[in-house]
Amino acid sequence: MPTPPNATDAEIIAALRSGRSNLRISRELRCDKTRVARLRIELGLPNVSLQPLTLEQKWASKTRPVDGGHLEWTGERAKAASTPLMRYKEASYSPAAVAFEMRHGRPSQGYVKAECGYPHCVAPDHVNDEAGRQQERLRRRAERGLGDVPAKCVSGHDMAEHVKFESDGRAYCGLCKVLDKRAQRNPSAPRRAKRRPASMEEAFRAHAEPVGGGHVRWTGATSHTTPAVWFSGTTYSAYKVAFRLQHGRDPEGTVTSCCDMPGCVAGVHVEDQPMRRRKQEDERRAARQERERERQLDRLYAGIFGEAA
Ligand SMILES: [Zn+2]
Ligand SMILES: [Zn+2]
Ligand SMILES: [Zn+2]
């Protein structure tokens, strides 16, 4: 008894009518090529010449849509990192880079990868190149009002040279990261001077980022909504630390930010309780003086024009 066919005649005929080649049909439907050829002759359908695929067509033939708009690469992968790899006319391509060029109509610059969270996604809308990522991060940074990048990192590296950005726009030192990684791989390698802050001031400055208008943004941790300095195992209110650094004395009572930038830790923009009280008194006195001046003016006019005026 012959082995049962893997596809029905109807399925093969439908495939033939869709314009696919005998070879492709026999592969896709796991059926005998001669059977496909025989059906083609019976139906009187012309042969499909094997058109070489374009780069994009080959790319598309190796992708599979996944939930969430992602695109999985079903083709070859580089062994070690299982990074998608595509060969076309004896050259190798990064499928992500092909996707990028399809989407943007220009060759990519630098490494192309997706940041959508799906591993090695090759969806054209999900991939970005080095230039695009940098642009996107600067945009995120501007959007969050993170201001200028500090001139030096906590280890004193020149940030103009080493600045890198998190996907949310936060800046970090690329050199520190490289040194940290190296130290992790080889614990005997010279370690980045991973300095624990030696002073409260240093702990504060490491997370105080000057932005425009004399304001200082807190980039460190917060406790509830209060910026918190972590030093020697204890957290302190960054407002209080800023106050102490500005005035050289301990504040009295609660310290709050008094400018129009929420969470600002600029020394000149924080106040303790006596300062707030004094400011209120000043405001009250100014209001009193203003009322007094109005009364004097009223009396003066009354003197000139009479009470009826
Ligand atoms: Zn994706
Ligand atoms: Zn650094
Ligand atoms: Zn401020």
Image: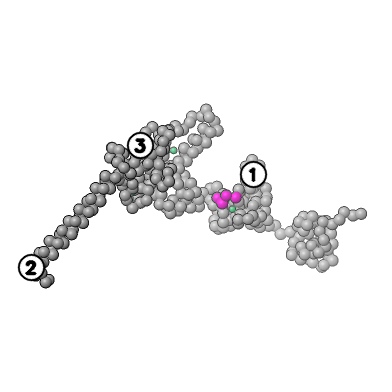
**Which disc, if any, is residue 201?**
3
Residues rendered magenta in the picture: 114-118
Structural crowding at the residue carrying mark 1, measured as other residues with C-alpha within 10 Å and reported as few (<14), some (14–19) or many (≥20): few
Structural crowding at the residue carrying mark 3, measured as other residues with C-alpha within 10 Å and reported as few (<14), some (14–19) or many (≥20): some
Q: How far apart, in angstroms, are the residues tagged by discs 2 and 1?
A: 95 Å
* Magenta segment includes 226: no
Closer to the chain start, of discs 3 and 2, is 3
* Side of 293 where 212 appears, left or right: right
The amino acid on which the numbered mark 1 sits, given as a three-letter code, is: Ser
Task: Label 2, secondary structure: give it.
Answer: helix
The amino acid on which the numbered mark 3 sits, given as a three-letter code, is: Glu
Front tag of 2 and 1: 2
CB within 8 Å, label 3 to label 2? no
Given residues 100 and 105, the one toward you in this image is 100
Q: Which residue is mark 1?
A: 82
Task: Label 3, secondary structure: give it.
Answer: helix
Residue at (11%, 64%) from the top-left corner?
Answer: 299
Asked whether residue 282 is in view, the answer is: yes
Residue 296, percent from left and from top = 12, 61
* Side of 284 where 263 appears, left or right: right
Residue at (34%, 41%) from the top-left corner?
Answer: 240
Task: Label 1, secondary structure: give it.
Answer: loop
